[in-house]
Amino acid sequence: MIDLSGRVAIVTGAGGGLGRAHALLLASRGARVVVNDLGEDADLVAAEIRAAGGSARPAQCAVDDAAAVQAMVDAVAADWGGIDILVNNAGILRDKSFAKMPLEDFRRVLDVHLMGAVHCTKAVWDGMRARNYGRIVMTTSCSGLYGNFGQANYAAAKMALVGLMQTLGIEGAKHDIRVNCLAPTGATRMMEGILPPEQLAWFKPELVSPAVLALVAENAPNRAILSAGAGGFELAYVALTQGIHLGEAASGEQILARWAELTDRSGDFAPMQGFDQARHELRKAGFASEG
């Protein structure tokens, strides 16, 4: 049983949808929850949690406003103590093909998804380091991991969060700060034209939130990309193939000629850090591994 009693959690974008489901579940497991969103939806969800016997407070601020985020964290810390859990869920969409997408729409999506997560994480980071405990969830997406037509801005932001997670997971490890990514699948308007209603009904937020609970537990993993949707859960990862070694005679022509060999996924592996790529390449060049 995952017990979050005594923990303080911030869930951004928690006024509805996935964020609301996350906040309700964390509160049901004993966490005191800060329901962050714009407008009265934050108040409504906080009231819903309190009516069910939980502890919650609304916090209406935009995550792309760093000063407002810091003020939110400072106020919560003053009243409830430090922040133990942060779920970066807030986001917006500005879908359009790249050819038709105004640059302001590209920047706006990055500001909310990427910089919003940066602002929130930065605001809680020092406190987590000082207390040697923290659980942070970034919300990535299959659009970022694999691409999706009409979502160049959203995909760029979501994949950037994976890189942020990987590095913060390394930097926070010695302070028991575990940072992971959630890649949720939820019902969208795009899906309405593809899936029949009985299948679409499976993609409800409540079937994603158990993944968040796992990622904020005391025994949570670190640096995982956990996909979730329709009650199914999968692990996504960025891997390297064994590849080929061409040495100093390497040419673009040789790379293409041996493409099938290069892309052979037997023996592929997920590097633990960026320098593992260099180690892998040096081993193929005949240099002994230095660990």
Image (spheres, grey):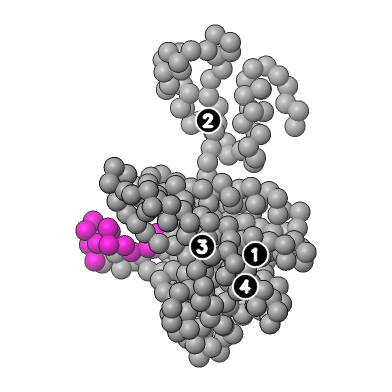
The kind of residue tagged 3 is Asp
Other residues around mark 4 within 10 Å, as few (<14) / some (14–19) / many (≥20): few
The kind of residue tagged 1 is Ala
Q: What residue is rendered at 61% in x and 61% in y?
A: 121
Q: Earlier in the sequence, mark 4 or mark 1?
A: 4
Q: Earlier in the sequence, mark 1 or mark 2?
A: 1
Other residues around mark 1 within 10 Å, as few (<14) / some (14–19) / many (≥20): many
Q: Secondary structure under badge 2?
A: loop
Q: Establish if 272 lies above or below 177.
A: above
The kind of residue tagged 4 is Ala
Residue bearing the label numbered 3: 64
The percent position of residue 176, horizontal first and vertical second, equals 73, 59
Q: Nearer the viewer, mark 1 or mark 3?
A: 3
In this orientation, does residue 234 appear? no
Residue bearing the label numbered 4: 71
Q: Nearer the viewer, residue 244 or 17?
A: 17
Q: Earlier in the sequence, mark 2 or mark 3?
A: 3
- Compute the Cα span from label 1 to label 3: 12 Å
Residue bearing the label numbered 1: 123
Q: Which residues are magenta?
A: 185-197
Q: Which mark is residue 200?
A: none
